Image: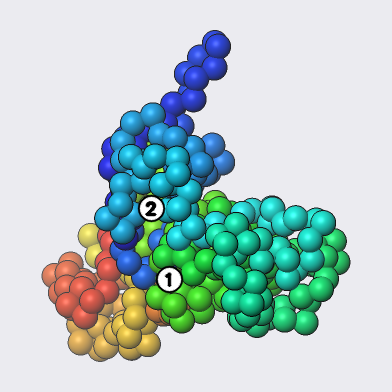
Amino acid sequence: MIEVKHLTKIYKTPSQEILALDDVSLQVEDGEIFGIIGLSGAGKSTLIRCINMLEKPTSGTVTINGVEITALEPHELRTARQKIGMIFQHFNLLSSRNVFDNVLFPLEIAGVPKKDAAKRVMELLELVGLADKANAYPAQLSGGQKQRVGIARALANSPELLLSDEATSALDPQTTRSILGLLKDINKRFNLTILLITHDMNVIKETCDRVAVIAESRIVEVGRVIDIFSNPQTSTSRSFINTVVKRDIPKELLEQSDSHAAPSERILVSISFIGKSAGQPLISSMIKKYEVDANILYGNIDRIKDTPFGYLTLELTGPPDQIDEGLAYLKSHGLEVEVINHV
């Protein structure tokens, strides 16, 4: 669906050059919700603006559905953008137009006949739950309602790709969940590819299939959300995950478990449960099967999009060979096992 190759963006000022994107490459598959997460200033907003050519890259290419949009002439680009919907952080609604006319606006630009356009607008307002607000003005709407209007407007021309630029960052948590639920419903209903940028790992956890982590203008990690949560490969990914899932063992718990066994017989492990394995009594089975005792120090069970996900930090004691066999048993059942340290 989207293929970004070696994208670089440099902003030039009279006194300096600012590298906003540094040789960024990634692929977004048709029909998936793909997230890009990074801190403020990491380059994520520049990336999404280069993808729809609101910003012209310094070098590199962007291809959408086989069309290299970085090579299009201005009139060709205007046509191509009609198939790329955009949701903005601060809604960008026209205050002088009511809800109906805000959604109608891109259809007017595209030259859609009035009768067809009016029908399309009401279909979209039904979809986002605002049919009763068609005659209201933006000043009369809540933040969540404004963003629903923005989503309806972005869908007006039946886009092949929907770009979301920090669409929930100005909303409260409850409204954020409702907007994310709407985006997931739209993705499933229309098989619409969504590229979503955010600085909030909760948004990635609840919504996305895959994610790219961007730091200091470069992509540092890409993968399935469930894989990155269970086994992050970079410090940047781990820091984002720690804002959602606390996996660090409190110091006082470590001190409490300090002298249960001889050093050679004690080990600390972190275990991730994914999917069906999150509901299976595998730790209990391991204890029964091997000469291993398990002390649960820390843990949690959550969901990543539609997949159960959990983790435990355990103190295992017993003969070293039995501990090794117990860990192998857990791994054989699909658990991610990381040895924290031998104590």
- Position in image of residue 206 (x %, y %): 50, 70
Question: Residue tagged by mark 1?
Answer: 192
Marks 2 and 1 sit apart, C-alpha to C-alpha, by: 19 Å
2 or 1: tag closer to the N-terminus: 1
- Up-down relation of residue 203 to residue 327 (above or below): above
Q: Residue at x 44, y 26 (%)?
A: 10
Dividing the picture into quadrants, the one containing residue 293 is bottom left
Q: Residue at x 52, y 60 (%)?
A: 85
Q: Is residue 102 visible?
A: yes
- Up-down relation of residue 151 to residue 122 (above or below): above
Q: Of tags 2 and 1, which is closer to the observer?
A: 1
Q: Which of 119 and 330 is in front in this view?
A: 119
Left or right of 61? Residue 9 is right
Left or right of 274? Residue 49 is right
Q: What element carries label 2?
A: strand
Q: Can residue 151 be seen in this view?
A: no
Question: Residue tagged by mark 2?
Answer: 212
The numbered disc on residue 282 is none
- Position in image of residue 112 (x %, y %): 57, 67
Q: What residue type is labelled 1?
A: Leu
- Position in image of residue 101 (x %, y %): 73, 66
